[in-house]
Amino acid sequence: MQMLYDSDSFAVLQIHANAPEESAPAPAVPQLARHGFEIVDKRSGKEVYLDGSWAEMFQQRLSAWAQNTPTQEEIEDTLEGYSGLANTPMSMH
């Protein structure tokens, strides 16, 4: 898990759900990778997990941002759009 963005309103984490631990033996049967992004809307206390095609689209957005550094307002506006998908209340694990 890697924190990509953290502000007063949002947090974005990149998650490598099936990343093997260094000491773990390689699995005998290949596993489907479930990499994704978690976007937390701190204002509403909800989160959304993007995987599959949603994660690919979000990764493209991140790549574009790496080429042309966005303002914080542009980042927040984009994350605001994804927060509409958030319907899962945050919970502590």
Image (spheres, rainbow, N blue to C red):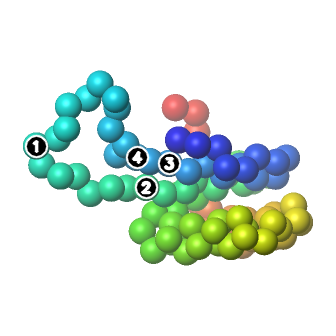
Label 3 with label 2: CB-CB less than 8 Å: yes
Whether residue 84 is visible, yes or no, is no
Question: Of callouts 2 and 1, which one flags the residue occurring earlier in the amino acid sequence?
Answer: 1
As drawn, the residue found furthest toward the top would be 23
For label 4, count other residues whose C-alpha is less than 10 Å away and answer few (under 14), some (14-19) or many (20+): few
Question: Of callouts 2 and 4, which one flags the residue occurring earlier in the amino acid sequence?
Answer: 4
Question: Of callouts 3 and 2, which one flags the residue occurring earlier in the amino acid sequence?
Answer: 3
Considering depth in this image, is 88 or 74 the residue closer to the camera?
74
* Residue drawn at the location 22% of the way across and 52% of the way down: 31
Q: Which mark is residue 15?
A: 3
Q: Which mark is residue 17?
A: 4
Label 2 with label 1: CB-CB less than 8 Å: no
* Residue drawn at the location 76% of the way across and 46% of the way down: 6
Q: What residue would you read off at disc 2?
A: 35
As drawn, the residue found furthest toward the front would be 67
Q: What residue would you read off at disc 1?
A: 28
The residue under label 1 is which amino acid type? Ala
Q: CA distance from mark 1 to mark 4?
A: 18 Å
Q: Nearer the viewer, mark 3 or mark 1?
A: 1
In this rendering, the answer to whether 53 lies above or below 86 is below
For label 3, count other residues whose C-alpha is less than 10 Å away and answer few (under 14), some (14-19) or many (20+): some
Q: CA distance from mark 3 to mark 1?
A: 23 Å
- Left or right of 56: which side holds 21? left
Label 2 with label 4: CB-CB less than 8 Å: yes
Residue 70 coordinates in the image, percent (x, y): 83, 68
* Residue drawn at the location 37% of the way across and 43% of the way down: 19
